[in-house]
Every structure is written in structure tokens, then in C-alpha cells.
Amino acid sequence: MLRIVTQLAEAEAELRRISERTQADQNLHREATVREILQAVRRQGDRALLAYTAEFDQVELSVAELKVSGAELEAAYQAVSPQLLSALRLAKQRIEAFHRQRVPSSWVSFPGPEIVLGKQYRPVDRAGLYIPGGRAAYPSTVLMNAIPAQVAGVPEIVMVTPPGSDGLGGKGISPAILVAAQEAGIQTIYRVGGAQAIGALAYGTETIPKVDVITGPGNIYVTLAKKLVYGTVGIDSLAGPSEVLIIADESANSLYVAADLLAQAEHDPLAAAILLTTDLKLAQQVQQAVTTQMEAHPSRLMVEKSVVNYGLIAVVPDLAAAVALSNLFAPEHLELQVADPWALLDLIRHAGAIFLGHHTPEAVGDYLAGPNHTLPTAGAARYASALGVETFLKHSSLIQYGSAALREVASAIQALTQAEGLPAHGQSVQVRLAEGS
Amino acid sequence: MLRIVTQLAEAEAELRRISERTQADQNLHREATVREILQAVRRQGDRALLAYTAEFDQVELSVAELKVSGAELEAAYQAVSPQLLSALRLAKQRIEAFHRQRVPSSWVSFPGPEIVLGKQYRPVDRAGLYIPGGRAAYPSTVLMNAIPAQVAGVPEIVMVTPPGSDGLGGKGISPAILVAAQEAGIQTIYRVGGAQAIGALAYGTETIPKVDVITGPGNIYVTLAKKLVYGTVGIDSLAGPSEVLIIADESANSLYVAADLLAQAEHDPLAAAILLTTDLKLAQQVQQAVTTQMEAHPSRLMVEKSVVNYGLIAVVPDLAAAVALSNLFAPEHLELQVADPWALLDLIRHAGAIFLGHHTPEAVGDYLAGPNHTLPTAGAARYASALGVETFLKHSSLIQYGSAALREVASAIQALTQAEGLPAHGQSVQVRLAEGS
């Protein structure tokens, strides 16, 4: 049963416990394994990929099979329903429209005579998207990773995903994933997952090209691999299990709240579903509704595990207290099922995505509202944001000084180079003044 | 002597060697040390900080001495020259003016009836700046880290820096650093450096508060510590040794080019100074000028080490070949000492900062032009950018749907939840349709 606490101190302690449910410390031995896998891929390339795929995925591949063939890509369209195809297209259109807004672009300014400053934006040359297999195939994740890369203008985008996601016990990839990829303009897909796939993208193999940035969620091995290769390549973030925090007042509908909590819990036994409410009656109704709705879930045992271990209802004195607790937790998803959600926004400091009002279930954002569903987890919203076009862009600062402009700042630079003990820096200015101007 | 190569293949091989001069692999044993330090700080707090400071910095501190006192802060102003103070103020003004441009801010849009989407930007709650001691005190680094955090509106900014940077053999901090900090609005400074300082900022101690994002350069131990705590906190980047790549044609002045190469080499024995030129005569003149100018350098042996090991002049057939090599190297600093530098910009894909024309030595950007001098090194410009206001900002996605808008997308969401095997996601939409609207 979903537990109700009514003391603020207890709520705070519980939120802290939930927030720390995945401490990196527990992963030291896994990290050693991952390091070994990365090294093997770096040294042996494709050969290591095939060996690990046989070992971890129980799938025997040849080098030629690493890349998903054109025939497979085409066939995937036959295997998805027209409903799914049109849903993917609607999602793509809305996600793309959102991501096209406020994309940074190159600029220059002229802050003084003979001075030009600016920034030149460029996409990365190559992006690698990791799409998990495992519990289920997530075509929405394909769209959420591929579309920002496309909008950024990345010339080459490749995807890796483990074999077997079609659920037929072989080498196949889920047709939904293959169709989503093609709808998002990706034709280059490699049949490999896990830490070995991250190694392939970071270092390159005979078959898989080295990329500049790796994005996409994965299990703990994938996440550890991303952390280890960070610095060799860029990464989007270190994804942990998903979480929702709902703030609800007496205007909320307990059935909606309960459904949203369960939608979170069904992701993963480590998923966290939290309700903070000012209304004790609502708390009790939600508790009841969660129990009822859970009965019917096909993965009831898994959902129950998440609800019992990392579910929480806290009754709080007022909405300000709820927001304070939420800011402490810095949730990946924050739902405001309150009468005036916009009034709370000013107080909210940390959240990956904020869902406002009674008719905005997280699912609408997970799939097609437009904003990215790849969001900071485990408190990372304190410092990080959703995956976006910026993940695939970078800029170069632009600086031009003329000789008179340089002369004007020469003595200031001289004072600073002296303070820092860098005489050649000073000399690089002086030599330009000596030689006429 | 600075070596000249004239074959493209050799130039490419040399650039690759230089680029790989700091491979993370060599750092496994150091990483174990750093991990131990971080654990100790996490568990023992201030006590560990004092012990490591005694061990690594040979400075005995009391807990009370960790924080730089108000009296010390005040006294620092007496110890810097009026020239340095006014240089710091000029630099501050120009850096701030540049960083105030194009700061992202919150927005909403209305893409359809009953639909609101947007982004809400917020600064992090607390930022921690690492300012190295070591070879020299760098007040410019204080400004380059503090000003973006201030422009972002970070409510609490703290700084850590190792004791002894005043060069008096005691606990003192360089007055130039203390003055730069105060000019940038920072009053909270802790006398601690190394991996232990990173641990303190990431986990918090009795004296030092846990922060949300850590920025600033440091030695290899600091960099490894930043990589290890990434995920617990945000970080700016993993800084490696500095580098410049100069593209020059026959219009370039060999004395300017040589001075800029040496300004890079004087940073560090691992610094890299590279010239790509279309003009063999210029190559020879620069080689000669570097030798001559190096004679007079007070740290001649160190500069020579850098020049010999990681310096290079490559003569290339044309500017396009030079740019292609530069894109391969993805330099931290790129100088275009050519007749028409703006004509080359379009071809440049990767560079931390680009200095255009004959009168823009890197030093002008290092100190006061405005753009940040904290830049991606070791090829990271392929995917990363300068430190900026964005480093201290993050955003929450905003999503609001009304009931009719939700109804319109319900069947698409249903198709996607079915494909992904997430029935409770579908249910969270259905429950809202069932209950009237």
C-alpha cells in the first residue's frame, strides 16, 4: 500500500531516502567490469562487440549483421500498425516544432572601434544515439533523441540498440524502433547494446564510427560506461530511474493523481512516485485508488514493489511547504494538479519538466507534447536540463581586435600578465605595438 | 628548436600525437587516490580537509582558518598595485558586458487551443569555483568563473583555492586572487585546494556548503575529482593542458606568430603550440624567432620543454588544408593570422575560441576581450563550448494541456503506450477522458 506521512520532518527524511536510492558508491565493482568492456572494445573493435553480444544478449552475430540492413528497415514498416505509424508522425511533428524554437545561432557584436566579438555555432560532426532494449522497446525515445540532433543539423547520426527487442528471441530489432528511427531520418543502426555499444561509439570500431556526442538512456552499465567515456566524447547526462512528484490541492481528482503515480511506478522497480498534498482526504482517496488501479496492472508485482519501496504520500500544511519539499527533491517530472498552477511557478526552482493543471498527465509529455522526455533524474534538476538541440551544438568564441583597440588595453593586459607571472603573454601584445600600427 | 614538417601525412600524425598527450588511461592509479580522498572528505568533513592540506600543501590549518577572514579580504586591497586594480576592473567590465549578451530567459508559446508550452530558466542555488594555486596565481580565472555565475543570478557563490598562493611560504592567498574575487562580488573563500576541495564542494563539510555546480581549472587530481563527482553535482568541463593552433599565410608577421606560440608554451610543459602555414619562409622565420625570443624567458627550460615536445610548425599547400588539419585537432585556441580571416570562418567546425587577424593575440582574449577563457581542450571543442552563463542556468520544460487538447491526442498516445507496453501510461489519459471534460 502507498504510505501516507503527515509530519514534515518525516516527509523530508523520506524524500531524502528516495532521492538517494541509487548511490554511485554501490557501483564500484560494476565500474570495474565496465572499464574492462570499454578497454576490450577499444583494443579489439568489432570482435569484442560480437563476443559481448554473445555473452550478455545470448545472440550470435557476424560482423556483417552488426548493421541493420536496408531490407530489415523496409520490412519494419510492414510490421507496425497504421495507428502506430500515424502516432509516431504526430509525435514527430510536435516534438520537432517545439525543438525548433529558440535554437541559438551565430552572432557578432561591435562593442567598440576596431573590436568584433561573437559566437559561431556549429553542430557536432557525428552523434550516436543509444536506444535501450530490455523491458520494452521505446520508439518515443528514438524520436526524443534523434529530433534534437536533426534540428541541430548534425550531418551524421547513428543509432545503437541491442538485438532481440522485437521479442522473438532472435537478432531482431523492434519494428517500432526501426520505424521511429526512419521517420526521424536515421538509416544507420547498429545491433549492439550495453557498455560495449558505448565503447564502440566512443572509440570507433571497424564497423561503427567514433562519434562526438553520445545520448540516450540505458541501464546502470550503459550509464557507467557513459560516465567513463565522458571527456573522450560528450554525453547528454547520466540517467537514473524515473520519478514523478505531484503537488495536489483539494481541487485535484484522486483518480487522475493515482493514475499518474502508477504510470510512473510501472517503469521500473526503482521508479519513484510521490504525492505532496494539502488535503488529507485526497491523500486517503489516492491511496485507495492506487490500490484499486494496481490490481488490474499486468505487471502488478513490479509496480507494487516500486510503490511500496519508493512511493510516498505526504500531507503538508500548505502549497508553499509542498514546493519547498519539491525543490529539495528536484524531481525529474513535477505535476501541479492544483487550482492555479501558474501561481506556483515562481516558487519552483528545480524540476526537469513541469506539467500544469488537471488535464496534463505526464504521459502527454512523455510522448508528444513537444518538450523532450529525456530529463535530469535523482536531483540532477538542481543543475541540469532536458536533452535539447543544444546537446548537439557547440560554439566558438569570436574575437577580433584592431591595432588601436589593442593599444588601448595594452597596459591593462601588461598589469595582469605581471600579476600572473606570464611574461610571454605580455610580450605577445608588446611586439604588436613596437612594430608600428 | 621548434620542428618544421612539410608533409601533410606527417603533420596529421604529429597533431594526433599531440592531441593524445594526456590520455585518461594513464590516470588509473591516480584515480584510486582521488577516490580515496573524496571518500575521506565525504565521511570526515573538515577533519579530512585539514589532514590533506597538511599532507599535500604542507600547511597546518585550524578549522577556523579554512575560511578567509574579512580582515584578510580587506588587507588584500592594500597589497595590489593601482594598475592591477584598474586592469581587473576593466577586465571585469568587458567580460560582464559580453556575458550579458543573449542570456536565455523563460518563455511560453501557444501552439494550439488549450496548449501552453515553454521553458522556465533558473540559476543553480549554489556554485563553487575552484581557483588553482600552483605555478602562479590567476586572478583572471577568478573573473572568468565568477562573472558568468553572477550574470546567471546564482544566489550563493563560494570559492576554494589552495593556501600559499601569495608565495610567502605560509597560509596566505594571493592578494590578486582575493581582490579579483571581491571585485566579482565573491566574499566567501575557503583556503583549500586539490581533490579534497572538490570533495568538499560536492558533498559539503561542517564549514563548506555543498554546491550544485563546480567550475574552474586545476591539475590532474582536481580534474579527476571533478569527473568522479559529476552526477552528484554539475561540472563545467574536464580541463587539460592549454593549446594554441595558429593558421598563418604570407601576410603574417613572424614575430607576432612566434610571440603567440611562446605565450602558449609558457603555461605548462604539456602546453601545445602549433603553427600551420602556407608559407615556408614564414615557417623558417617563426622557427628562428621562437628560438630568439625563448632565450630571454625567465622560465626558459620549461618553455623549451613544451616547445620541443608539443610544438610544431607544419607547412601546408593551402589554407583549406590548414583548416582541415585544424578541424581534426579541434584546438582550444585558434588564431587566424591571415589576410582575410573572416573568409575562413565558414570552414571552421571545431575551435574553443577563434582570434581573427594580426592584432588579436590570444592574450587579449585570455584577459579582457570579454569571451570566456575557460575553453574545451584536447579535442573537446568537437562537442563542447566555453564556460558561460548557461553553465550556471538550467531550465524546466513547461507543459499545459486542456481537456479538449488532451482528447485530441488521446488515441495517438494510446497507440504509443501499447507499442511500449506501458498500460498505466495509457490509463492516465483514459481516466481523464472518462470523467467528463
Image (cartoon, coloured by chain):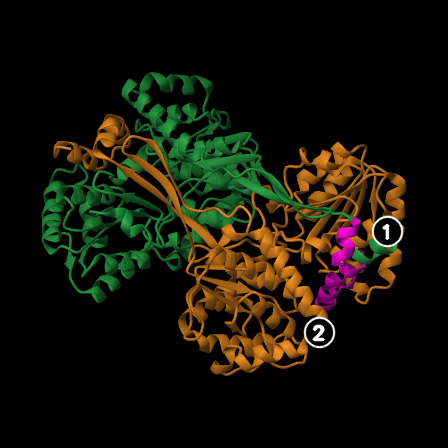
Chain colours: A orange, B green
Q: Which residue is mark 1?
A: A255
Which residue is farthest front?
B113
Label 1 vs 2, first from the N-terminus: 2
Q: Are marks 1 and 2 on the same chain?
A: yes
- Distance, label 1 to label 2, CA atoms, is 30 Å
Chain ID for label 2?
A: A
How far across and how far down the image is residue B287, in percent? 12, 50
A368 relative to B324 in the view: left or right = right
Q: Nearer the viewer, residue A49 or A292?
A: A292
Q: Chain of mark 1?
A: A
In percent of width and height, residue A168 lies at 67, 80
The residue drawn where x is 42% and y is 66% is: A210
Q: Which residue is mark 2?
A: A81
At horizontal 83% and vertical 53% (from top left) the residue drawn is: B432
The answer to whether one can see residue B302 in this image is no
| First to last magenta residue range | B403-428
Which kind of residue does numbered mark 2 sit on? Ser
User: Which type of secondary structure does the marked residue at label 1 adopt?
Assistant: helix
Q: Is residue B169 part of the magenta span, yes or no?
A: no
User: Magenta residues: mostly which secondary structure?
Assistant: helix
Against A122, is A318 above or below?
Answer: above
Q: Quadrant of residue B278?
A: bottom left
Instruction: Identify the secondary structure beneath mark 2.
Output: loop
